[in-house]
Image (tube, grey):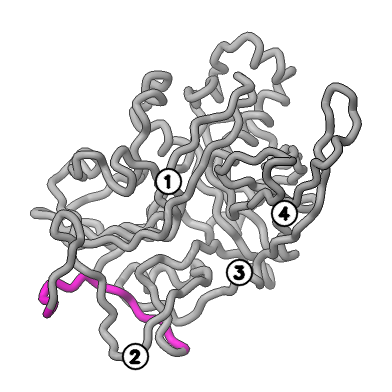
Amino acid sequence: MQVAIRPVDVWLFRDGKPFTAGEDHIAESTFPPSPFTLQGAIRTKVLADKGNPSEFARKGQPDPEVGYGDNFGKLRLCGPLLMRCKDGKCERLIPMPADVVKVGKRYELLRPKSNLPFATNLPNNLQLLWARTGERVSEAKNWLPESQWENYLKGQPPSQAVWAEDLFTFEPRFGIAIDSTKGTTQEAMLYQARFVRLKDDTALWAEIGGVLLSTKGFLRFGGEGRAAIYEAIQEPLQKSLKPLSQFNAANNATRFKIVLVTPAWFSGGWQPRDGDWSKIFGSQVQLIAAAIPRPLLLGGFDVAKRVPKPMRSFVPSGAVYFFEADEPVKFPVDFALTETPDEVKEQNSNSNAWAQIGLGTVLIGVW
């Protein structure tokens, strides 16, 4: 089921850095939220519809649909992605891929270049990404709409983009810490948090499977349990929002690039610990180059166990990996570019449990 998720007021999606009122004064936000935030909201909704989530947490027994802890049961997620609806037409948006740069008023693509007139210190003989232009190049910080995905994945630079200011704004608000035992404010505990306010025609898109969920309802979404309304996307609009795997422009190709549209985790930071990508692809491939923005720190709070989750470094959405293979590679429909920590695998029968809840979702193109 594809759904659109809209805020009732504003949202708060804290980044992974620890925050304590009185010790820190600004709580930063990240947007769009990670798949962890989405799975927490959907699991809570499913359990609330069944009865008392607190009783479920106390028993600590896996639910057949949504599991428990790092066991996600039958839950399957894709997203969340930004979505904009105008004039009866909706399209999804992703952060501008890191291999897209701005040259004057146009966009150009970075490509691996091997015959450079100088040496680099890139690891594993990776090639430098190079723009085929002598003009000044700057970072492209906008959002890539769905109407541009197909051409981009075929190796053509985007012809248009969407500014973040046209989709959402950050709204700073002040607060003061509350003493939970007394229900009163605490002295010298002022703080500031950056909330997210979506424009009227903007929502979050997600695909949810494996659980029984009504076609419309409320969610507790993000920090402070802020309210959201979700609603199933109906035909014929649902058909126009085709699965991301159908955008694959590189099936049976030997040179391809993979663009992360949701964050991914790897045992070696930005790649597998041993640098062996064949475990993920199931065939021999070689990493040629990569365009990777700064790491994204994600942690959170385990509501069931009432303890903070470990904070980990993730490769953010927008990262691009360039590969070559000895033989044409055929990608499965549910292909995801991510690993799962061993401690999570131990609790889940799915060896790639984090892909199950939407991490490492990709678009695949040629270069």
Characterize the local packing of mark 1: few (<14), some (14-19) or many (20 or more) Cα atoms within 10 angstroms: many
The numbered mark, 2 or 1, whose residue comes first in the sequence reads 2
Give yes or no for residue 113 being in the magenta stretch: yes
The reply to whether discs 4 and 3 touch (Cβ–Cβ < 8 Å) is no
Residue 166 located left or right of residue 161:
right
Residue shown at 59%/55% (left/top)?
A: 31
Say which quadrant the C terminus sits in: bottom left
Of marks 1 and 3, the one in the foreground: 1
Characterize the local packing of mark 3: few (<14), some (14-19) or many (20 or more) Cα atoms within 10 angstroms: few
Indicate the secondary structure of the residue bearing disc 2.
loop
Residue indicated by mark 3 = 164
* Whole-percent x, y for residue 86 in the image: 67, 70
Residue indicated by mark 2 = 135
Which amino acid is tagged 4? Phe
Q: CA distance from mark 2 to mark 1?
A: 33 Å
Q: CA distance from mark 4 to mark 2?
A: 38 Å
* Whole-percent x, y for residue 89 in the image: 62, 68
The numbered mark, 4 or 3, whose residue comes first in the sequence reads 3
Give the image quarter of residue 52: top right
Q: Nearer the viewer, residue 45 or 171?
A: 171
Residue indicated by mark 1 = 314
Q: Nearer the viewer, residue 57 or 16?
A: 16
The numbered mark, 1 or 3, whose residue comes first in the sequence reads 3
Report the disc number at residue 195: 4
Residue 31 located left or right of residue 250:
right
Which residue range is magenta in the image?
Answer: 105-117
